[in-house]
Amino acid sequence: MNNQAQADTGVRKIIDVVIIGFGGLGMAIKLREAGNDNFVVLEKADEVGGTWRENSYPGATCDVQSHMYSFFFAPKHDWSKRYAGWQEIQQYILDTTDKFGIRPFVRFNREVCAMHFDQAKGLWAVDTMAGEQFVARHVVMASGPLHVPSIPTFPGQEKFKGQIFHSAQWDHDYDLTGKHVLSIGTDSSAIQYAPEIAQKVAKLHILQRTPAWVIPRDERPYANWEKRLFASVPLTHSLHRARLYWSNEARVWPLLSPRVTVVVQKLAKLFITTKVHDPLLARQLTPDYTFGCKRLLVSNKWLPMFNRANVELVSVGIQELRENSVLLRDGRELQADCIILGTGFVTDPRIYMKNFPCKGLPGHDLMQDWKSNAEAYYGTTVTGFPNFYQLLGPNTGLGHNSIIFMIEAQVHYVLQCIKRLQEKGADYQDVKPQVQREFNEQLQAKFVGTVWSSGCSSWYQQADGKNIRHWPDHGIIKRCSALAS
C-alpha cells in the first residue's frame, strides 16, 4: 500500500465509488447504509433494470424461485408465484431503487468507454460515451456477464424480406399470429418464448445444434394467506427462504459427484420420454453429454411443445437465407416470415467487460491480461488493478442457486476492502500476484472429478477448456485479508 496521497488540487470532485452497471443496486444500497453517499451509478440505458429491462420476450421468467431472487435485506413478501415473470422482477427492481433512494445517484445514458488508474494519485478516471469523466477512488464493475446479445449473420441475409430479431431485442410491434417462424437455438430464452409463440404461429421450426438437459419447474402461485403470513410474521418468510436456499444447495451435489449424476441423469431422460410422445423425437431431444456439464434448463412447457402439429425440430444448419425462406444444409427449404435468434449472449469476458480500455498499474491492461486467461481473486479483484472490483466476475456463476446470493457476498467483500483501506489511510490496495495465482490453482483443482470436467464443451469454458464461469463448490466465503499490505 502507498501512503495517503495529498488531496487533488483541481476543482473536479473526487467520487468515492463509481458503480458501472445497474447490477450494482445492492452495492449502492449498502454504501448508503454505511453512511457513504459519495458515489454514482453509471447506467448505459435510460432506465434501471438491466437484464429484466431488456429481456421482455413472451414467457420471460426467472429460473430461480422468486423469494430467492431478491435481496435478503430488501424482501418482497407478495410474489405472485414461485417463479416470477420479467414484469414482476423489473417492478421489484424499480421499487427497491426508489425505496432505498438510489435513483438520484444514477446517471442515465452514461455508457463507459474507457478507464485508467493514476498510480500517483491513487485514483481512477472513468470516461463515458457522453463525454464526461468521473474521477473515483474505487470502481465497481457491475454490468454482468450476460448483457451483450450474440447475434449471428447468415449468407444471403440481405436478401431476406422477413423480420429478424434477437430474443433480448424482442420486436413487440411485430405480430407473429399466423406466421411461419424459424427459431434458432435452444438456450434458456428459447425454451421460454418458443412454447408461448407456438400457440399463435402457423408453423414453428426449432433449429437445434445441441439438445439441452431440461428439468421440471416446481411452479405454483402463492396464496393470499401465504403473502399475508410472510408480511405479518417475518420469521415465516425467513424460514421459507432458508428452505428454498438449502433445497437449491442440494442440487449441486449431483454435479460434484459423478455417481450421483448417473442417477439424476436417468431421471432427466425419463422426464423427456414421458413428455415427448414420439420416441424418435424424444431421442433427438436427449443430450449425449453428462447431465449438468452445460447449463441445466428448467421448464414444464418446452418438451410438451414438440407434441404440437405445428412445431418441428430441425437439427440441420442453415446454408443461406432467401427472400422468403431458409435453405438448410441438407437441401430442404423452409418458408419463413420471421427468424428469432435464441442464441444467447457473448460470454467472452473481454466483451462482457464492455471491451473498452481498462488500464491499471503500469503494464496492466485488462483486455491483454485476460487475453488468454480470465481470472480474479474470488471473482472480484484482479492483480494489477487497485481498488477495482467486479460483481459476477470470473468463476462466480452458479448453476444451482440464486446469483443474488453471490452478489450479496461480493458486495460484503468490497465493503470490507474499502473499510480496510480507510483504516490504513492508504491510497490503494492490490491483490498480490501469487495470492491470485494460488487461489485460482486451488479453484481449478476443485473442478477435477465433477461434471464440468467430463469432457463436454460449454460457454462456461475458455477456448483451451478452462472453466472461467462456474463456482465449483457450494457456498462462498470472501475475505480481504489476502490483499496486499
Image (cartoon, rainbow, N blue to C red):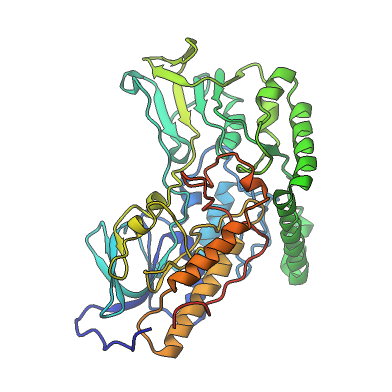
**451 relative position to 172: left or right:** right
> Which quadrant of the figure has residue 264?
top right
**458 relative position to 67: left or right:** left
The one nearer the camera, 95 or 7, is: 7
Relative height, residue 203 to residue 415 (above, below): above
- At x 62% / y 56%, what residue is drawn? 472
Residue 461 appears in the picture as rendered: yes
**55 relative position to 387: left or right:** right
The one nearer the camera, 154 or 385, is: 385
Relative height, residue 119 to residue 325 (above, below): below
- At x 47% / y 10%, what residue is drawn? 331
Q: Quadrant of the C terminus?
A: bottom left
Instruction: Give how far across and how far down residue 403 sits, in percent.
Output: 59, 58
Instruction: Give how far across and how far down residue 106 sits, in percent.
Output: 38, 65
Relative height, residue 458 to residue 100 (above, below): above
> Which quadrant of the figure has residue 410?
bottom right
Q: Quadrant of the N terminus?
A: bottom left
Instruction: Give how far across and how far down residue 305 sits, in percent.
Output: 66, 26
Relative height, residue 31 to residue 141 (above, below): below
> Which quadrant of the figure has residue 442?
bottom right
Query: So how many labels did they put on this image?
Result: 0
The one nearer the camera, 457 or 14, is: 457
Instruction: Give how far across and how far down residue 148 sits, in percent.
Output: 41, 46
- At x 31% / y 79%, what residue is drawn? 122
The one nearer the camera, 434 or 2, is: 434
Residue 100 appears in the picture as rendered: no
